[in-house]
Image: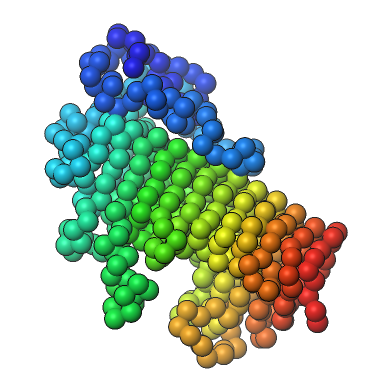
Amino acid sequence: MALMRHSFSLCVLLVLSLSTSCYSSSFKESDSLRRSYVDDDDREAIGFYGSGAAHPSYTNIPENPKFSEPINRRTQLFGTSSSVKMVSVDDFGAKGNGAADDTQAFQKAWKAACSSNGAHVLLVPKKKYLVKPITFSGPCKSQLTMQIYGSIEASDDRSVYSKNLHHWIIFDNVRNLLVQGPGTINGNGQIWWQNSCKKKHTMPCGTLAPTAVTFYQCNNLVVKNLKFKDSQQIHVSFEVCTNVQASYLTVTAPETSPNTDGIHIANTQNITISNSIIGTGDDCISIVSGSQNVHASGITCGPGHGISIGSLGEGGPEDRVSKVTVNGAKISRTMNGVRIKTWEGGSGMASNIVFQNIEMNDVTNPIIIDQNYCDKGKCKQQSKAVKVQNVLYQNIRGTSASKYAIAFACSKSIPCQGIVLQNVQLDKRAKCSNVNLAYKGKVSPRCAW
């Protein structure tokens, strides 16, 4: 790769698509090292070149300006820097052969970059790195970019998770972090799927499996142009985070892989997911309690269980989700299209939700609200329920794989309120109960009361 020998543009190595300024560094590296983490074939794939070629053109939807604050703030931070220091995991002994345990090398490289002042780029070269459960802890002194060119691979030895069955990779309490591809995070989840009660019915359903990547209590976070593959369970989870931008992500797992949600959002505010392709064995995007100001655009979903809010209210707690917009999605051959699911007996509210500009292709349940959700067969009817109100379905068209394209199964005790269907064109029929419903424009099918 033809990088300059004595200085090079840190527009190529920094955050780079997030700022129009370039910085120069006197850091010298050998030709072999340069080739190890990027080559000419990667140019089109690297997000900071601004290429969206791997994503359908319809997904390139401008993001809502109110979600651009984290990027603007990050640009300002780097605009004051005159140099950026680079740290490679190879410098700390990582082998990158897919067999040697590189966990400690990653941990040491992170510590070196995180504990130093100024801007740092932590490089994961274009190799295959075996990494056991690891936590990248903050707060960091530096403004940190993790640049992943290679593949980070999970061990298929379940015993290495004996201390924590919930997580594989955690980013904990880090501010102003960018994690960027074009590399891959591979959960090698096959051994976990085989031992799920959904695959092996003799196994107890309480058996845990790790979430591949968890961002916990991260603020001003950017995750872009990464591939997530074959997670043990959830692929990437944003938990208790604020101001998050996630874009140009590709998430893949077999349709038969259990509980492999693509992107999970919990107790997180001000998050945008854009221009991403997700196909798994569970929800493409799941949004659960405590999440607010969630914006998803340009999403390709399928296979999987669609885009879901919930479940909410399991076990009786007060759960709240509000101000969710899904604007621009293509959902194909999934179990559900756009779904809101809440448990009877819970409390709280799902409100101010917009699903718009969505194409459905052979989806079993294209539009569904289920206030009586239960995954344990038939549950006992209860008087309490999570309230569902102010939901707009706008400019949605396509085909259903079942006889009902629209299903509103709302609670007798707390009916759904303020549900609007506007310019919805789906085939098949609709069934509705206990819902306050309005139509605008051309809507088909309509509920038969």
Task: Give me the residue at 77% from left, 60% from top.
Answer: 425
Please say if 128 is above or below 21. Answer: below
Disc tally is: 0
Q: Is residue 65 visible?
A: no
Q: Which quadrant of the structure image shows residue 53?
A: top right
Is 220 displayed left or right of 406 in the figure? left
Colour basis: rainbow
Please say if 208 is above or below 295. Answer: below
Residue in front for this viewpoint, 337 or 390: 337
**Where residue 326 sits in the image (x, y, percent)?**
63, 53
Q: Is residue 371 visible?
A: yes
**Where residue 181 sits in the image (x, y, percent)?**
39, 36
Location of the N terminus (image quadrant): top left
Please say if 426 is above or below 414. Answer: above
Residue in front for this viewpoint, 421 or 84: 421
**Where residue 400 sits in the image (x, y, percent)?**
66, 65
Task: Give me the residue at 69% from left, 61% from top.
Answer: 399
Residue ranking furthest to the right: 441
Is 441 displayed left or right of 408 in the figure? right
**Where residue 38 sits in the image (x, y, percent)?**
33, 25
Task: Give me the residue at 70% from left, 58% from top.
Answer: 398
Task: Give me the residue at 60% from left, 77% from top.
Answer: 371
Location of the C terminus (image quadrant): bottom right
Is 359 displayed left or right of 101 in the figure? right
